[in-house]
């Protein structure tokens, strides 16, 4: 079955450490996204990518970085500059590009990041 | 610009009762509207979507939503709640001809009592 795989499910970060969250999709989708979810705040967009080797900042990109070297993969790095990284992180993908606003997003099962 | 307001961060119903989750949107052009459901420690799953065809949209698990342009609303309903419906529900809007990045509401937690 096609879908989105996020790993690990739980991740712990030490002070001053960078950590990378993995996101892989086999849906052949062009667009991929990273969201941060905090209780009562809904989903906030961190980064998104429409094509390989291109990505744009979302609403809360500070302290995060991404890469899109392959269509299937969109890893997110939470850097030490992100002072409050404890949250639930969701990766999503969707078909098409800017003219496909009617296409729904498909989500992974998330990674829960905590500070040690 | 586009925005979504979900009225009520928590909605509590008894099993078998009507479920009504409210969503109002703001969009300068005809919108596309989505409802997603999230179970604990999982990602979001699409319940249904409105893309300018029929105004009454039927989704999975017995849910439906009606697009009302005059009220800028897209409320989610289910005639009879089941215990398994307890989850977080998100409304989202994107714009035809504009940014395809959807804007999400803050979510409504549905609590179902036996």
Image (spheres, coloured by chain):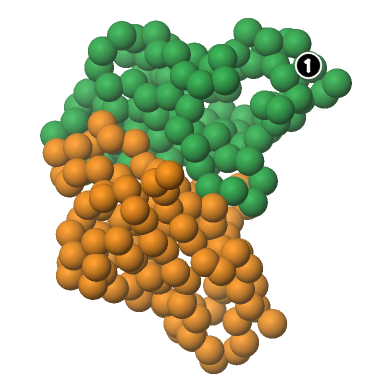
Q: Residue at x 37, y 24 (%)?
A: B49
Q: Is residue B73 left or right of residue B44?
A: left
Q: Is residue B28 left or right of residue B35?
A: left
Quarter of the rendering occupied by the N terminus of chain A = top left
Q: Is residue A36 visible?
A: no
Residue at the farthest right position = B114
B102 to A25, vertically: above or below? above
Mark 1: few/some/many CA within 10 Å (<14, 14-19, 20+):
some
Chain assigned orange: A
Q: Which residue is mark 1?
A: B15
| Residue A36 in the image, given as x and y percentages of width and height | 49, 59
| Residue B31 in the image, given as x and y percentages of width and height | 27, 26
Name the residue nearer the viewer: A31 or A37.
A31
Tell me where residue B85 sits by quadrant: top right
Name the residue nearer the viewer: B24 or A107.
A107
A76 to B58, vertically: above or below? below
Name the residue nearer the viewer: A2 or B78.
A2
Q: Is residue B97 left or right of residue B85?
A: left
Chain letter of mark 1 equals B
Q: Residue at x 48, y 52 (%)?
A: A108
Chain assigned green: B
Q: Residue at x 23, y 36 (%)?
A: A101
| Residue A88 in the image, given as x and y percentages of width and height | 57, 60
Q: Is residue A73 visible?
A: yes
Q: Residue at x 62, y 30 (%)?
A: B8
Tell me where residue B110 sits by quadrant: top right
Quarter of the rendering occupied by the C terminus of chain A = bottom right
Q: Is residue A30 left or right of residue A43?
A: left
Look at the numbered disc 1 and give the secondary structure of its residue. Answer: loop
């Amino acid at each position: 079955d096609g879908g989105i795989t996020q790993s690990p499910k739980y991740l712990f970060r030490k002070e001053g450490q960078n950590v990378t969250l993995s996101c892989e999709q086999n849906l052949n989708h062009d667009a991929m996204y990273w969201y941060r979810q905090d209780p009562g705040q809904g989903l906030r967009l961190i980064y998104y990518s429409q094509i390989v080797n291109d990505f744009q900042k979302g609403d809360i990109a500070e302290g995060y970085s991404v890469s899109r070297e392959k269509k299937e993969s969109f890893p997110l790095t939470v850097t030490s500059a992100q002072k409050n990284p404890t949250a639930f992180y969701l990766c999503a993908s969707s078909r098409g590009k800017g003219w496909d606003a009617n296409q729904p997003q498909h989500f992974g099962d998330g990674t829960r990041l905590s500070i040690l | 610009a586009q925005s979504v307001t979900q009225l009520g961060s928590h909605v509590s119903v008894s099993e078998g009762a009507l479920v009504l989750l409210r969503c109002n949107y703001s969009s300068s052009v005809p919108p596309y509207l989505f409802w997603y459901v999230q179970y604990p420690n999982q990602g979001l799953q699409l319940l249904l979507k409105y893309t300018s065809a029929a105004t009454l949209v039927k989704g999975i698990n017995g849910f439906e939503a009606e697009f009302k342009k005059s009220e800028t609303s897209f409320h989610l309903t289910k005639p009879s709640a089941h215990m398994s419906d307890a989850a977080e529900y998100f409304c989202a809007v994107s714009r035809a001809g504009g940014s395809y990045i959807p804007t999400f509401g803050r979510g409504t937690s549905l609590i179902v009592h036996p």
